[in-house]
Amino acid sequence: MIQATSSDLAIELVGVTKRYRRNTAVRELSLQIPKGAAFGFIGPNGAGKTTTIRMIMGLLPMTAGQGNVLGINLNSGQDQVKRYVGYVPEQHFIYRWMRVGQVVRFCRSFYETWNDKYCSELLDLFGLDGHQKVKHLSKGMVTKLALVLALAHEPELLILDEPMAGLDPLVREEIVERVLHSICERKRTVFLSSHTLSDVRRVSDVIGIIHEGQLLTVAPTEQLVSGTKRIRAVLEEGQQPKESPEGTIWNRVQGREWLITVKDFTSNTVERLRSANPLQNIEVIDLGLEEIFKDYIRGAEVAA
Amino acid sequence: MRALIWKDFMANRVLWIGGLALILLPYLLCALVATISYKGQAHDWWYIFANAPGISCMISFLVVAMVGGVAIAGERPDRSSEFLAYLPPSRAAIITSKAMVGIGVITVICLLNMFALYVIEEVKTKEVLERMKVVYGAICSSAILIFGFAWLYSSFLKNPIYSTGLCIATVLLFWMLFAFVYDTMNWGSNHMVIFTPLATVVGIGAFVGGIFSYLHRVEP
């Protein structure tokens, strides 16, 4: 999808596989994310998103495949990667006995690029008091603290794994509007994994959909949303579909109604469909990211 | 490294303070009992108070087991080990810091006990000092043995209570086994000559095993 040289890539995975005994969590995943891109990574629960992220972070060894993050080989420089990556996991396990100021000082000692001024700005922005103990913070405030820790060393790559899970809409809005947009404006690479597709849509330039450890598609957000359409065709009495159009993601026949979701939709798609099948009527429906996501998953499940 | 050492020290500060209080408690209680039952003879008071180091030593061993038990596993129940895993320090740096804090604490505990014994046994002659050296050896080797096993279990168990408990059970088994073999083999009168190096070697072996286990473990 994106042609780039290795030095332009923030993340480059080639045929990455992760197996746990008999269970394959990630299957030959290949992915290229250029520096400065905002990548949205979506998939159902257990699809392999967190496993992929943990391999990118160097926390989990790959069973097979090659990976480079910011030019660092994941098979040999796992510890190095963490110096340049800011990571916000779904659940936060920051030392509860520490005060906010102590956590900040503790983390600061590990990064040469730590920006004290930026850190103070973020703490002020989120209303975090350095004297407060982490165990006394609400879930939203802990997430904000995790974001401060991930951002204050000005990472070249920011990885967010379900960062907004369980947060109320106001906090989510604040994080997306104030933080993620500013990161994207600074031309840092963002890797966002989330179930909140509206957030993914707003933040990401490129979206990848993963299901059962396999990457189903990677496409620029606008191309994915505008190029994926649902066709609602009515078959002639007593007829069955003969040929699905090229780029069919998912289709279903119910009575005379034939629903087809296609990618890379063009006006030719309708013409070809009409000429190859006995159809009475055709309607083209625009889809939101949520519907597109669901249809990719349904299609993969049918194919499996 | 300084930040890691600070964190490892502060994370278990309640154990350090509580452990120190427990170790000193026998001295306080013995002094109290000795004072209450004091009948005007100075050596009576001293005779009762002299029980304190033995009791304190036993408590110290329990504290050493807890120090080793929480060293690594202490960060697993609240999953703060995961937070640390996301930060840049390597696992080698993390384990080095934990080892430094653990070894530092048990050294203080051993020195405290040795000093108390030195004072209470009134080491004034060469003979007493020679006898005390054997006792010192037994204390230090036992502490190494206990810490080693607690550390080893801590490296892979998820809860410090399990690692501490399993360590105590293992060390008791080791002592019983040693006593059984010693009696069966009829090795002579000074069993400490055998026990001290054996316990030290086994303890260090367990400690090294713990490091190896931690470094090869995928966490979280």
Image: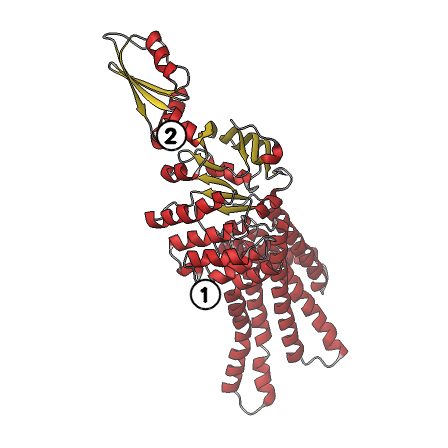
Chain of the residue on which disc 2 is drawn: A
- Which quadrant holds residue A7? top right
The percent coordinates of residue A88 (x first, y second) are 47, 47
Q: CA distance from mark 2 to mark 1?
A: 43 Å
**Residue that appears at 64% across and 54% down:** B207
- Which quadrant holds residue B127? bottom right
Badge 1: how crowded within 10 Å, few (<14), some, or many (20+)?
A: few
The percent coordinates of residue A237 (x first, y second) are 23, 8
Name the residue furthest bottom: B40
Amino acid at circle 1: His
Amino acid at circle 2: Phe
Residue A15 vs residue B166, the one in the foreground: A15
> Is residue B78 visible to the viewer in this orientation of the structure?
no
The secondary element bearing badge 1 is classed as loop
Which numbered marker is on residue A131? 1
Circles 2, 1 touching at the beta carbon (< 8 Å): no
- Which quadrant holds residue B115? bottom right
**Residue that appears at 37% across and 37% down:** A197
Badge 2: how crowded within 10 Å, few (<14), some, or many (20+)?
A: many
Chain of the residue on which disc 1 is drawn: A
Q: Which residue is mark 2?
A: A293
Q: Identify the coloring.
A: secondary structure
Tell me which label, 2 or 1, sits earlier in the chain. 1
Q: Quadrant of the C terminus of chain A?
A: top left
Name the residue furthest left: A237
The percent coordinates of residue A55 (x first, y second) are 54, 38
Q: Is residue B177 above or below residue B124?
A: above
The secondary element bearing badge 2 is classed as helix
Q: Is residue B167 left or right of residue B194?
A: left
